Amino acid sequence: MTQFLETTVDKFSFKVATDRLYTPEGLWARLEDGQVRIGVTDFFQQHNGDVAFAEVMPVGMALAAGDEIATVETIKVDIMLPSPLAGTITAVNEELELAAELINQDPYEAGWLALVQPANWAADKANLMDPEAYFVHMKAEAEQEAKKI
Amino acid sequence: MSAEDKATRVKAVIVPCSGIGKTYGTVSREAAYEITEELRPEETQLVPLSMLVMGDEATRTAVANHPAVAIDGCKLACASKMVQESGGTVAVELAVLDVYRRHRQFKPQGIAELNEAGYQLAHALAEEVATLVDEMTSDE
């Protein structure tokens, strides 16, 4: 069962799952049987608002780390999501086509974006943040945002 | 038509989001204006959410005596919640985002002044509400 690091900033509570790695932009990557599942974080979804549409690159597409893997349109912004790793997309979450709100409702599980066959996971994961590091990064961002309110 | 006549003819109150400075809130209000002023002026009555929040007696009475169509701008669903907290009944709960998902070609932008697509989305939403009001009326 997934464990979480949790914090509350102002009136908002944020969770960071401890069983995966993160990018500073708010994507997570979790190794599962040799493939890497990708999604967005709880902070990402709360910060950017309700998702109207999510479009993930198609199965079979080869990506370098940092290439666009998906775009998300929320009630606030349109965001290009950079892939946390190099590899080939082997599956996309088709549920998002009719229920993009899964990203808001369950960002760490049902709201996943894509499954990627990694090209060089050992190298790419070295560039990702562990949960504790992302938690500190996310909390700082959340506190910065809270000051703007 | 007098206010009293109108009150007896009204079949539903329309309660839009009050989100100021929010695009989807503006869409909800533009749609509410179109429904209550143009599409179904005799059957519907606009209820400003702020009046409910302030506890205005006439507004609370209108909500208590008529089914409400709540149009929410975000998942906080303030319109729906305030209708319920005011003793009213939410007959229909609509979210602007859900309507946009059905009309992706109308991407709303702007806040005080919507872009053209925003007004088109508001119109689509107003049409949906008008249909729902007709269904509510036909049920009587």
Image: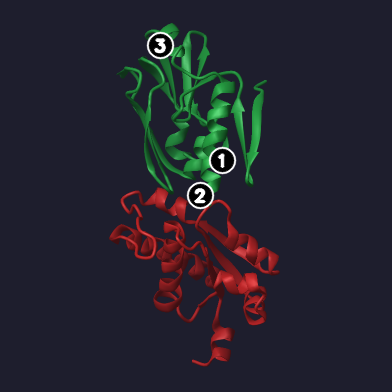
Question: Residue B117: percent from the left, percent from the top?
Answer: 31, 58
Say whether marks 1 and 3 touch (CB < 8 Å): no
**Above or below: residue A146 compared with residue B19:** above
Disc 2 residue crowd, few under 14, some 14–19, many 20+, Cα 10 Å: few
Q: Which chain is red?
A: B
Question: Residue A132: percent from the left, percent from the top?
Answer: 59, 22
Quarter of the image that includes the C terminus of chain B: bottom right
Find the distance from the CA under tag 3 to the CA under tag 2: 39 Å
Q: Nearer the viewer, residue B128 or A62?
A: A62
Q: Quadrant of residue B38?
A: bottom left
Q: What residue did someone put label 1 on?
A: A143
SS for callout 1: helix
Q: What residue did someone put label 2 on?
A: A148
Q: Nearer the viewer, residue B1 or A46?
A: A46
State the hue of chain A: green
Q: What residue did someone put label 3 on?
A: A118
Disc 1 residue crowd, few under 14, some 14–19, many 20+, Cα 10 Å: few
Q: Chain of mark 1?
A: A
Residue for point 36% across, 55% down:
B108
